[in-house]
Image: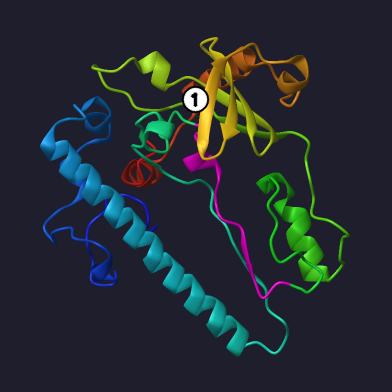
Amino acid sequence: MDAHGPLKSISGFDNSLHDVPHTWTSNDFENWEMILADETDELFQEHLQHYRELYATAIDYLDQKVTQLATDLQENTDDETTVIVTADHGENLGYAEEDRLFNHTASLSEALLHVPCEIINAPSWLDAEYNEVFSHLDLGELITAIARDTPFSEMPHRSHVPAEVIGAGVTNPQLNEKYWDRLIRAVYTNPQTKYVWDSLGDSFVQHKTDDHWEKEDAPIPPEILAQFETDIQEYKSTVMDDEQRVDLDPETESRLEELGYL
């Protein structure tokens, strides 16, 4: 949880990595305030710089903790011990390629979808470096192969890699609630091509050239739509109906709110 908000300087961080005052906290700005802020405003720019520096420092802190954990496991186990490090999502930090967004709602940006998958003390039959698109949908197969020491000739590969965010984004009177609550789907056909569409009817294709993604409005081909079993409009309606039936106990609701999900 150390890379989640609110961000602030803590004693466990390597404070040589940032210049953020100890009195500063990311709670000084709400998420929607960051989205609506004037990019030329000096206070916003200062807050943005602090946010990015502390996020990077928090990741460094997590790297150290995971490294120590992996070392302790290997030193205190008799058998070969492999550690797989990954994440459920990344984070938008307000860059142009992230549509100036923050946090991880109402978006399927590269910053959110591309997460680490590091294998510490991997078996010798695994490639030292794998640069193709690898999906969490195949993580179970990878873990099973390592645990059972049953080598496969090549890493699991998908010709189409899907991703989806259902909605429940930023809600504020100054923002278009329907837009932020839209369902978004994306499908990679290779590391440089991604199709994206949403429940409001917008669709486009992105092509990566060098380190830049170019965006072009385009209809979604049938074979791309077929990567999901249910039509996007139908699924969004089903989810909205299900949300109306959800009954959370006060403790769970409070915890989800603290984590930023409500």
257 and 86: which is toward the camera: 86
Does the rendering let one see residue 198? no
Whole-percent x and y of residue 25?
A: 18, 51
Whole-percent x and y of residue 240?
A: 51, 19
Give the quadrant of the C terminus.
top left
Q: In the figure, 146 relative to 243: above or below? A: below
In magenta, the rendered stretch is 108-122
Whole-percent x and y of residue 14?
A: 29, 71
Does the rendering let one see residue 12? yes
Q: Tell me, what colour scheme is on the image?
A: rainbow
Whole-percent x and y of residue 213?
A: 52, 31
Asked if residue 196 lies left or right of residue 167, the reply is right
Asked if residue 54 lies left or right of residue 215, the reply is left
**Residue beneath disc 1:** 243
225 and 178: which is toward the camera: 225
Q: In the figure, 155 relative to 43: above or below? A: below
Q: Amino acid at mark 1?
A: Glu
Q: Residue at x 77, y 67 (%)?
A: 146
The quarter holding residue 61 reads bottom left
Q: Residue at x 45, y 32 (%)?
A: 247
Q: Residue furthest front?
A: 210
142 and 110: which is toward the camera: 110
The quarter holding residue 223 reads top right
Q: Residue 121: within the magenta?
A: yes
- Local packing at callout 1 (Cα closer than 10 Å; few below 14, some 14-19, many 20+) is few
Q: Secondary structure at mark 1?
A: helix
